[in-house]
Image: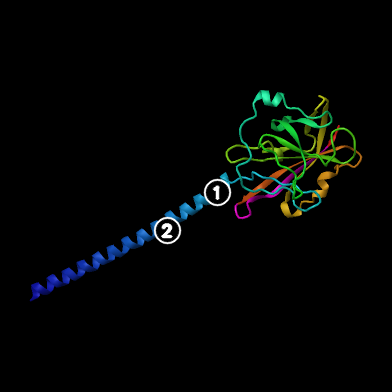
Amino acid sequence: NSITNSRSSGQISMNRKEAVLFGLAIILFIVGMGIAVNGYIINGRINQKVYAYPSVYAVEAGSDQSLTGGFGDDVSEDPIDEPRHNNHWVPANEARYIRIPKIGVNSMVKSATVDDSGSVQVPNSVHTVNWYSKSRDFNAGTGASFLVGHVSGRASIGVFYKLHLLEPGDVIEIERGDGQMLNYRVVTKESLPVESVDMNQTMLSVDSGQKGLNIMTCGGEFSSERDEYLERILVRAVQI
């Protein structure tokens, strides 16, 4: 009986050890799965933030909205080849090219009107810029010429990716359709929460006594929930 009792006690002890080890294994498995799932979620959020892009910008005069980003595949990211760049044509008093030496911009500029919703037509390439034709042209008149462009695409940077690096005193060059060169000096640069942008200001010169040039693009963090960047970068310059 003592031998039997000893064996029974040993079996009970072993069963308890096995139960404890089994329980620990289950706990470790659950913890491991939790870590894996959490890592998957975090990576998904990071990838969504990195690759999400605003392929549609809308600029509505007289509203508090500046550029709003949506999703779509109708904006080209293909490079602009040299023949297409060199053969770009616009009327004499419109902007043909914009060059910003400090940030390496040398882009075609196209005239844009508004769509049925009252929003400025967007560039059809991340590498080109649109001039809002209801703003000041590059000949006579008062106020400011208003340009918009993309900050990024799905896999490539946009023409105004480095716009935030401009500082007061930097030079912006505009070549008109007739070949005349116009130079502008940056006066202010602002990064504004989208809710606080006053679009009326984009049509006005930063100095009422001088011809102005205002450039806007998206900036700040990208919100996957809102499908847009949370800030707008506005550079305002005057002709020199």
The residue depicted at 12 percent of the width and 74 percent of the height is: 5
Q: Which residue is mark 1?
A: 48
Among numbered discs 2 and 1, the one appearing first in the sequence: 2
Examine the rendered structure and indicate whether residue 207 appears above or below residue 106.
Answer: below
Q: Dot 2 surroundings within 10 Å: few (below 14), some, or many (20 or more)?
A: few
Q: Residue 15's x, y, as percent?
A: 21, 68
Q: Residue 190's x, y, as percent?
A: 76, 45
Q: If the image is split into quadrants, where does the N terminus sit?
A: bottom left
Q: Which numbered tag is attached to residue 207?
A: none
Amino acid type shown at disc 1: Gln
Element type where label 1 sits in the image: helix
Q: Residue 206's x, y, as percent?
A: 85, 43
Q: Main secondary structure of the magenta part?
A: strand
Separation of residues labelled 2 and 1 (CA atoms): 21 Å
User: What is the span of residues highlighted in magenta in the rendered image?
Assistant: 224-237
Q: Nearer the viewer, mark 2 or mark 1?
A: 1
Q: Is residue 214 left or right of residue 153?
A: right
Viewer-side residue, 146 vs 239: 146
Examine the rendered structure and indicate whether residue 236 appears above or below residue 62.
Answer: above
Picture mark count: 2
The quarter of the displayed image where residue 85 is located: top right
* Colour scheme shown: rainbow
Q: Is residue 226 magenta?
A: yes
Q: Which residue is mark 2?
A: 34
Viewer-side residue, 63 vs 17: 63
Q: Residue 106's x, y, as percent?
A: 71, 29
The quarter of the displayed image where residue 152 is located: top right
Q: Dot 1 surroundings within 10 Å: few (below 14), some, or many (20 or more)?
A: some
Examine the rendered structure and indicate whether residue 167 appears above or below residue 11.
Answer: above
